[in-house]
C-alpha cells in the first residue's frame, strides 16, 4: 500500500492519510478578523472530497497587538467562536480533519496594522521587515501566554480537531527562540532552554485549557538560515522538550527565513531538518516545502524523512491536486 495513503494516529487524532494542507494566509477574513462567506467558500473548495486528511487553518492572531496583517483571521475574543464553528463544521462535512493555527506576530507586524508599537523578546529590529519593537516585560509575557491559552480554548469550543502553536517564520515565539532577536539577560534569554521557556509555558497553558484529549501541534522554525541564528541542534533540543511537554505533532518550517529559503530548492527542501528532528522524537513530524508531485511525497515518506507531507502552493493553485494525487497512487475518496 502507498505510504501516502496509510492512516496515522497522533494522540486522539486519527488521519485517513499522510497528506496535509499547511496553513497559508489568505487575507480573506473580515476587517474585524471574523469568518465570512469568502473564507467559508475557500476552505469548502480546498477540502472538497475529503482527499486531504488534515487541513491546518491559516495563522490567527491571539490578541490585537499580535495581528500580523490586514484581514488576518482572529482567535482573539469569544465573539469569533460561532464563525469558527461554521468553518470547522464545513470542513468536517467534506471529510477532512482540521486544526487551527494560533499566533502572535511580535515584531513581525507594523504599527499601522496594530495601532501600537510592536513588541518582541528584545528591542532588536526584525531581521526581515525591519520594524523596531520594544522589549516585553515579564507581566506582558504572562499575558501573552494567557492569550495563547484563551485562543486554544476557543479553537476547541469551535469544534476543531486540534490547535497548532505558531513558532516559526519570524513571529513572536521564533523571536524568543532565535539569538538574532533574543538578547535578554533574564530567564527568557541566553541558553536554548531559556529561549524556549515561553514555548513551554504556552504549551502548558494550552494543555491546561484543552485537556489531555485535544491534540496540540507546534510549527517550529528549525533554522533561521542566518549566521548567529537558530541551529538544527537548537531545534533538536527544543523538539525533545516539546514532545515531553505534550505536543502531539511537530510541523517543521523555516525561522526568520520564512517558508522559502534562497538557495534551498527542490521538492521537500526542509527534508534534512525533518529527518534530523525525527531522530530525537517519537511523535509525527510534518514536512512541507515545494512538494508538487505525489510520487516525490511517497518517496520522502518511504525514506522516513517525515511522517506527514504538507502540500501548500500546489493545492493553493489547484484545489483538485489532492484528488489527482490520491487517484494516481491508487486510492479513492477518503471521506
Image: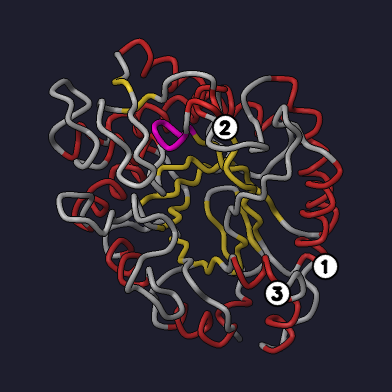
Quarter-wise, where is residue 205 in the image?
top left
Q: Which residue is mark 1?
A: 49
Quarter-wise, where is residue 279 in the image?
bottom left
What is the CA distance from the residue labelled 2 to the residue labelled 1? Answer: 29 Å
Q: Residue at x 42, y 80 (%)?
A: 266
Q: Which residue is mark 2?
A: 61
Label 1 neighbour load within 10 Å: few <14, some 14-19, many 20+: many
- Asked whether the residues under the numbered discs 3 and 1 touch, taking CB atoms below 8 Å apart as contact, a structural biologist would say yes
Question: Mainly helix, strand or loop, the magenta region?
Answer: loop
Whether residue 87 is in magenta: the answer is no
Quarter-wise, where is residue 194 in the image?
top left
Residue 261 lies left or right of residue 25; in this view the side is left
**Mark identifier at residue 322:** 3
46 up-or-down from 238: above or below: below
* Mark earlier in primary sequence (2, 3): 2
Q: Residue at x 41, y 55 (%)?
A: 258
Q: Position of residue 25 (x, y in %)?
A: 61, 49
Q: Position of residue 327 (x, y in %)?
A: 74, 85
**Mark identifier at residue 104:** none
Residue 24 lies left or right of residue 285; in this view the side is right
Q: How is the image coloured?
A: secondary structure
- Quarter occupied by the N terminus: bottom right
Look at the numbered disc 2 and give the secondary structure of its residue: strand
* Mark earlier in primary sequence (2, 1): 1
Dot in front, 2 or 1: 2
Q: Residue at x 30, y 61 (%)?
A: 277
Dot in front, 2 or 3: 2
Q: Write down the region rendered in magenta.
A: 104-109
Whether residue 106 is in magenta: the answer is yes
Amino acid at each position: 500500500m502507498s505510504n501516502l495513503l496509510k492512516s496515522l494516529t497522533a494522540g486522539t487524532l486519527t488521519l485517513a492519510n499522510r497528506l496535509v494542507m499547511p496553513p497559508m494566509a489568505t487575507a480573506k477574513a473580515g476587517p474585524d478578523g471574523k469568518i465570512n462567506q469568502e473564507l467559508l467558500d475557500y476552505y469548502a473548495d480546498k477540502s472538497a472530497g475529503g482527499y486531504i486528511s488534515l487541513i491546518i487553518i491559516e495563522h490567527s492572531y491571539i490578541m490585537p497587538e499580535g495581528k500580523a496583517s490586514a484581514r488576518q483571521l482572529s482567535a482573539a475574543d469569544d465573539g469569533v467562536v460561532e464563525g469558527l464553528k461554521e468553518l470547522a463544521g464545513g470542513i468536517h462535512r467534506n471529510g477532512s480533519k482540521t486544526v487551527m493555527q494560533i499566533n502572535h506576530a511580535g515584531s513581525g507586524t507594523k504599527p499601522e496594522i496594530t495601532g501600537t508599537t510592536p513588541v518582541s523578546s528584545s528591542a532588536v529590529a526584525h531581521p526581515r521587515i525591519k520594524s523596531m519593537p520594544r522589549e516585553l516585560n515579564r507581566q506582558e509575557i504572562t499575558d501573552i501566554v494567557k492569550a495563547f491559552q484563551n485562543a486554544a480554548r476557543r479553537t476547541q469550543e469551535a469544534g476543531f480537531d486540534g490547535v497548532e502553536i505558531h513558532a516559526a517564520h519570524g513571529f513572536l515565539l521564533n523571536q524568543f527562540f532565535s539569538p538574532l532577536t533574543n538578547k535578554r539577560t533574564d530567564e527568557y534569554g541566553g541558553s536554548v532552554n531559556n529561549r524556549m521557556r515561553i514555548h513551554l509555558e504556552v504549551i502548558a497553558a494550552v494543555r491546561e485549557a484543552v485537556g489531555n484529549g485535544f491534540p496540540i501541534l507546534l510549527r517550529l522554525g528549525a533554522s533561521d538560515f542566518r549566521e548567529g541564528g537558530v541551529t538544527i541542534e537548537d531545534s533538536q533540543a527544543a523538539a525533545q522538550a516539546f514532545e515531553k511537554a505534550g505536543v502531539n505533532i511537530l510541523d517543521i518550517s523555516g525561522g526568520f527565513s520564512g517558508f522559502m529559503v534562497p538557495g534551498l530548492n527542490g521538492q521537500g527542501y526542509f527534508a534534512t531538518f525533518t529527518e534530523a528532528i525525527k531522530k530525537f522524537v517519537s511523535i509525527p513530524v510534518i514536512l512541507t516545502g515545494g512538494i508538487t508531485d505525489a510520487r516525490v511525497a511517497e518517496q520522502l515518506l518511504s525514506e522516513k524523512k517525515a511522517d506527514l507531507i504538507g502540500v501548500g502552493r500546489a493545492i493553493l493553485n489547484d484545489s483538485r491536486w489532492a484528488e489527482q494525487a490520491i487517484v494516481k497512487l491508487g486510492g479513492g475518496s477518503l471521506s
